């Protein structure tokens, strides 16, 4: 099974990337877990007629992914532009073929409420994209707590356990949706 992770934060020491790095290092047996690099993807513009190489790379990764894992930061109570942009590009492909029907889960680190508002908005976006979000368990973390070290690495055992539980649930969800 192949999981493709996308982090909506481009910051070097991002706590959201820290969540995804932990998930990658602790993915269930049999799961190939890849983290996409979206740092060079330009903002979607229908006037761009030839897809840039970073966009094509993301499309290749999405084409073989069985499920998506989205690291969802919260910017001004909503989805980070980099993450939304990484979903906008493939949504314009004929038939939404790279996204439609794929299972997806979210995890995020942000201010006081974690990224609950952004994750709720992301669920709304998933309706249009025909992605199938995993409902539970949810992963929310306070990015400004001692749950992370100074390089953005996750050190909180409770959140670590929650990520492992979420990934195991995503394996089950992906298997159910493939039937």
Image (spheres, rainbow, N blue to C red):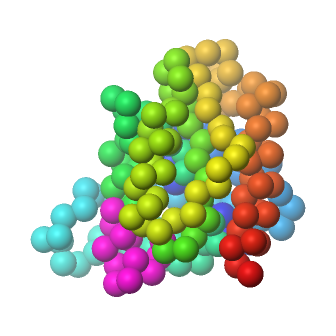
Find residue 22 and report its image quarter: top right
Residue visible at 37% across and 52% down in the picture: 84
* Residue 44 shown left or right of residue 173 in the figure: left
Question: Can you say whether 42 is above or below 176 in the image?
Answer: above
In this picture, which residue range is highlighted in magenta? 88-99
Q: Nearer the viewer, residue 151 or 33?
A: 33
Position in image of residue 66 (x %, y %): 64, 72
Position in image of residue 56 (x %, y %): 39, 74
- The residue most toward the right is 29
Question: Can you say whether 28 is above or below 61 in the image?
Answer: above
Q: Nearer the viewer, residue 138 or 151?
A: 138
Position in image of residue 115 (x %, y %): 51, 32
Quadrant containing the N terminus is bottom right
Whether residue 167 appears in this view of the structure is yes
Whether residue 15 appears in this view of the structure is no
Residue visible at 44% across and 61% down in the picture: 127
Quadrant containing the C terminus is bottom right
Q: How many numbered discs?
A: 0
Is residue 87 magenta-colored?
A: no
Position in image of residue 24 (x %, y %): 71, 51
Residue visible at 42% across and 52% down in the picture: 124
Residue visible at 44% across and 38% down in the picture: 118
Question: Can you say whether 13 is above or below 62 in the image?
Answer: above
- The residue most toward the left is 47
* Residue 111 shown left or right of residue 173 in the figure: left
Is residue 95 magenta-colored?
A: yes
Question: Can you say whether 141 is above or below 133 in the image?
Answer: above
């Amino acid at each position: 099974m192949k999981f493709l992770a996308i982090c909506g934060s481009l910051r070097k020491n991002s706590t959201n990337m820290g969540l995804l790095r932990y998930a990658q290092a602790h993915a269930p047996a049999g799961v190939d877990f890849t983290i996409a690099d979206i740092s060079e993807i330009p903002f979607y513009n229908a006037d761009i007629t030839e897809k840039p190489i970073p966009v094509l790379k993301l499309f290749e990764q999405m084409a073989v992914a069985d499920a998506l894992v989205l690291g969802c930061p919260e910017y001004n109570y909503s989805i980070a532009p980099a993450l939304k942009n990484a979903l906008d590009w493939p949504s314009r492909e004929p038939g939404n073929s790279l996204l439609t029907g794929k299972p997806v889960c979210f995890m995020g680190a942000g201010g006081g409420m974690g990224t609950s508002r952004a994750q709720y908005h992301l669920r709304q976006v998933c309706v249009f994209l025909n992605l199938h979000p995993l409902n539970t368990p949810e992963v929310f973390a306070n990015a400004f707590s001692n749950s992370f070290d100074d390089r953005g690495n996750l050190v909180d055992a409770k959140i670590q356990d929650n990520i492992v539980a979420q990934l195991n649930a995503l394996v089950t969800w992906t298997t159910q949706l493939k039937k």
